[in-house]
Amino acid sequence: MAKRGNSIIKGIEISEVINMLNKAYADEWLAYYQYFIEAKVIKGIMKDAAIAELEQHATDELRHANMLADRILQLGGTPLLNPKEWFTHTNCGYEEPKDFDVVAILEDSIKGEQCAISTYANIAESVKDKDIVTYDIVSQILADEVEHEEDLQALSDDITDFITSMKKHI
Ligand SMILES: [Fe+2]
Ligand SMILES: [Fe+2]
């Protein structure tokens, strides 16, 4: 644990920060697996473009988990040690893919990103002007999640437009 590093945190309990980060850490692992498995089972039109996007997101979520684990350790905490705890700590849950169609998979993923955006916006708000380092880390992750939502929505719109124009020509 970094003593001087932690002494600059003011106005918030370090245990509270660790708790928020561990909950987000659970979300990131579940998001990672959701993207991993979605990229495997997805079916339908333009699925290759969707697979590329889902795989990129899986990589990003794992990188986020890494960033959070490192920050939790710096703060003197312990990242969740048992995957069972992902389900008891998660903010955003896990959306098991039931319909493997591209549009349905993208819809599930967009919901997940919207939840992630709210989660990181809340953490950023809680640590703002109190824990500068955590604020910086969650701001970087938040920017990625905003980009994820945008990428998925743009892809979903492209696919929906393509289907609509195909139907017109049949
Ligand atoms: Fe993430
Ligand atoms: Fe994301």
Image (spheres, grey):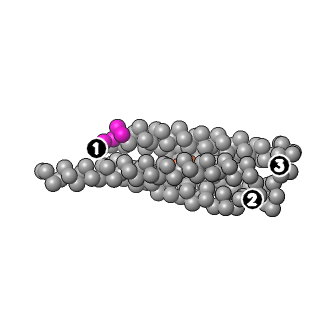
Quadrant in which residue 65 is drawn: top right
The answer to whether 127 appears left or right of 90 in the picture is: right
Q: Callout 2, which amino acid?
A: Asp
Residue 34 is marked as none
**As shown in the figure, which amino acid type bears the numbered disc 1?**
Ile
Q: Quadrant of residue 51?
A: top left
Residue range corresponding to the magenta coloring: 45-49
Q: Position of residue 36 (x, y in %)?
A: 48, 40
Query: What's the CA distance linking mark 1 and mark 3?
Result: 51 Å
Residue drawn 47% across and 52% down? Answer: 149
Q: Which residue is mark 1?
A: 45
Left or right: where 163 falls relative to 127: left
Q: Secondary structure at mark 2?
A: loop
- Quarter of the image where one finds residue 17: bottom right
Residue in the picture at 47% in, 57% down = 111
55 up-or-down from 110: above or below: above
Q: Which residue is mark 3?
A: 6
Q: Is residue 120 left or right of residue 33?
A: right
Depth check: 16 or 164 in front?
164
